[in-house]
Image: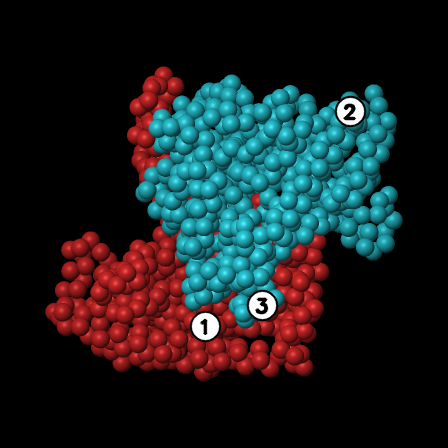
Chain colours: A red, B cyan
Amino acid sequence: MLSRFMSGPHPAKRRLVAMSSHLGNGPQNGGPTGPAGQTRAKVLTIDSMNPLVKKVEYAVRGPIVARATELEKELEKGVPKPFKQVIKANIGDAHAMGQKPITFLRQVISLCVNPDLLDNESFPADARERARRILQGCKGGSLGSYSDSVGVEVIRKDIAAYIERRDGFPSDPDNIFLSTGASDAIKNCLHLLVAGSGKTRTGIMIPIPQYPLYSAAASQLDAHQVNYYLDEDNNWALDIAELERSVKEAREHCTPRVLCVINPGNPTGQVLSKENVQEIIKFAAREHLFLMADEVYQDNIYADGCAFHSFKKTLMELGPDYAGLELASFHSTSKGYMGECGFRGGYMEVINMDPQVKLQLKKLVSTKLCPPVSGQATMDCVVNPPQPGEPSYESFIKEKTAVLTSLAERAKLVAETFNSIEGVTCNTVQGAMYAFPRIHLPQRAVDKAKSLGQSPDGFYALQLLEQAGICVVPGSGFGQRDGTYHFRTTILPQPDKLKIFMDAFTAFHNKFLKEYAD
Amino acid sequence: MLSRFMSGPHPAKRRLVAMSSHLGNGPQNGGPTGPAGQTRAKVLTIDSMNPLVKKVEYAVRGPIVARATELEKELEKGVPKPFKQVIKANIGDAHAMGQKPITFLRQVISLCVNPDLLDNESFPADARERARRILQGCKGGSLGSYSDSVGVEVIRKDIAAYIERRDGFPSDPDNIFLSTGASDAIKNCLHLLVAGSGKTRTGIMIPIPQYPLYSAAASQLDAHQVNYYLDEDNNWALDIAELERSVKEAREHCTPRVLCVINPGNPTGQVLSKENVQEIIKFAAREHLFLMADEVYQDNIYADGCAFHSFKKTLMELGPDYAGLELASFHSTSKGYMGECGFRGGYMEVINMDPQVKLQLKKLVSTKLCPPVSGQATMDCVVNPPQPGEPSYESFIKEKTAVLTSLAERAKLVAETFNSIEGVTCNTVQGAMYAFPRIHLPQRAVDKAKSLGQSPDGFYALQLLEQAGICVVPGSGFGQRDGTYHFRTTILPQPDKLKIFMDAFTAFHNKFLKEYAD
């Protein structure tokens, strides 16, 4: 038990520090240079702060990204660089990379924000009707009031209706929890699941490579991170034998209670087949695991022959043997064709959650009052888009299709280009917004990195940034098999920028290989 | 150490439960009614869930509020009730109670959401200029992109400039962290501060009565809640002798590291004098405490002779002896004259935070990507309102003044009415949005409550809801001295509704006193 708190100073030592800093700053030690002067010892230091927070790692916004921002500022100031612009391919942020918002969505939200416009006929009738309906669901008819902690009721109903249409099975609005982006809901769900100590402490099964929110939450909650490896040689498929190995080994030192699956995959871009989803459900049932399905990329499917199979639908289709499985599924406004990250909209649907636990979840979310109502309204537009015959339908479909078609083209271009370069291999980007190519680094580059105290992929990514202005995230931020090196790049730069990106990358990589040739 | 996890089942018992449920559902136990049927044992139950979440209490959205929502639905269905409407005075939600949004603010946000309107001259030029400026600060010029995790840079600069104007002392934008409402920032700050075990475990000093976010966060973080009592006989003033008693007693069993102060007070409505703020700062310095100043009601000052004295300004004025004190101050879009709760805008300013800890804080907030950008834009409008000479200035000032004047009148009306009723006493509502009257309950009412297994104030509040349709929060949800009973009500019902409220309350209370007369 104690060992879980040992990453900071030893408790006894910490107590001494606390005592001495108190003594040195106590009331008995007054005077102008005494208790509170500029030189007073800090209450909160890197040694005295929460050790669990220190353990958190989150590479998507780590030091390489910070350096990219610095470089942007240097470029603005006219500092000469070997590139004209920094291309930030580190994060799935479509609008930041120039994607235009969906017109209908922004019309509805602006009408909700500013109801003085509701009678303005320059807005299409369906947008005005949607906004009126959302506002009727808001207390006082205002987006500025708190909603219920679980979200605006009418929006929860719209989400449930969307899920029913998608899956062909009933969805209960009482199972829908709106959230501040999907991250918030994922953290809340994990929060509920972590308990016990020593061997009974909760283990959270996480894919490797993973989206680092999961490992960050595990660190913060002091849970055991239980890794299962995706199969790079098989387009990052999820192999049940590997799940079995992972859970068996984990049971030696913790109690695995939850299986996290990201489909379509982040950072890996694979789309699970229906059979694979079925097998995973059966595995979770056999091993008595709560299933968390991160399905925020459900609209981002590109490769021929791939389709999105929701865990909810697949579970229902498996019939009564599996109908009782506990499942939480997550969705978001930030991805898909809309890319509305800034509004922080998201939801989770919980299936078969114990009613008493659900009450506890409602209490937990109530301490944060409610998710942003503008984000909830954005979510409503996503699940309740214009229908055939409505005035906005055609332009909406045109915009949506254009975004998804272009993303599919870029997904193909990126993987193909990577595979055309010596020392780089990349699986098909079947879905989501990322490629996770493997870079085969010469030993001399690995040695150089180690001599600098950097990870080899971190060293590579930093060089790529400094020399080519391209910001990606090293594979070590997501996890990878020992001795393999990768990076994650989004496929989001607009087509013209993506060509600059791929050309600059190719030139950099060839130069790098030459420089560090064995 | 173990004792902190003992509120759930005993660890050994829990282990047995976990083992047996695994055995009972393991792979060896197949068949249609076996591992995954509808009757399968849940992974996540009230016994197996996170015990820290179970300990959380949050009365502002507790069972009485849930019952109020049920009553509203019953009224809608035509179920006869002794009242025509439910008045929800449980939460500081101005728009829900009919307050209109500030026009300028909503114009700016709608322009940010829908930039197609930026050239529309029916919007005032200053609103269009503000929106353009905010959008220039957003990546890709879109509110839909992620901002930096700490917030949009130009908005952080505007906040720092606002603090400088307010206090007359410099403020560094690098010390500003935008947040999802103030609650989010408060939780993050407490998160950093909690460490240690046993007697070195962090103690969080909290006023009683308090806003229950603080106790909820302490429970969730498994920190010690250290109570200090506000002085009801002295208009809820903060007495330094009581702080000294509290910290001294707490040192027997934990390490108090942070002092939380709410000014103006929630639920108590007091406004601290400058001398009081000075004394608190000196106390924090003497006792080596990190100071957290919840100043979200800084614009809500009503009583003659009262003024808001920020902790930052007062600290700076105290000179070099105190200039090094660690302070975090919190503000929000949800309160003040704007009442924009739903946008979830807020920020904290940290002063004298250790640079390494600040980096950890930046990392921690980055795992949630960013606060809602629409909420950030709302915050910008609050700290950067129309200036004299700008087209919106006069209408803005008129709207702002009307709200604050009306709130001041309501603050007075509420306290005066309570004090005119037998068995009710209420301190002056100097600021914030609440009254916290004391109800002197007859012994027979206390006995009746106990016979029902309810707290006396909880029983009273439930009767008030069932009989008069008035929803308030029992004092026990905020903490109160043993043997005293209170409730919190907002002063937010619009004047016409407030009269109905006070009349209905008076009638209920008199009837209640008669019914339970000793």
Mark 3 lies on a secondary structure that is loop
Residue at (41%, 69%) from the top-left corner?
A97
Do discs 3 and 2 belong to a common subunit? yes
Do discs 1 and 3 belong to a common subunit? no
Residue at (30%, 62%) from the top-left corner?
A76
Residue B496 placement (x, y as % from top left):
79, 44
The front one of B327 and B514 is: B327
What whole-number distance in Å separates the C-alpha atoms at marks 3 and 2? 58 Å
Proximity of marks 2 and 1: CB atoms separated by less than 8 Å: no
Q: Is residue B148 above or below residue A94?
A: above
Q: Is residue B223 above or below residue A76?
A: above
Query: Residue lying furthest top in this view?
Result: A28
Q: Is residue B154 above or below residue B10?
A: below
Residue A185 placement (x, y as % from top left):
53, 55
Which residue is identified by label 2?
B423
Is residue B202 shown left or right of residue A357?
left
Quick one: label 3 or label 2, which is nearer the N terminus? 3
Proximity of marks 3 and 2: CB atoms separated by less than 8 Å: no
Which residue is identified by label 1?
A99
Which residue is identified by label 3?
B121
Mark 2 lies on a secondary structure that is loop
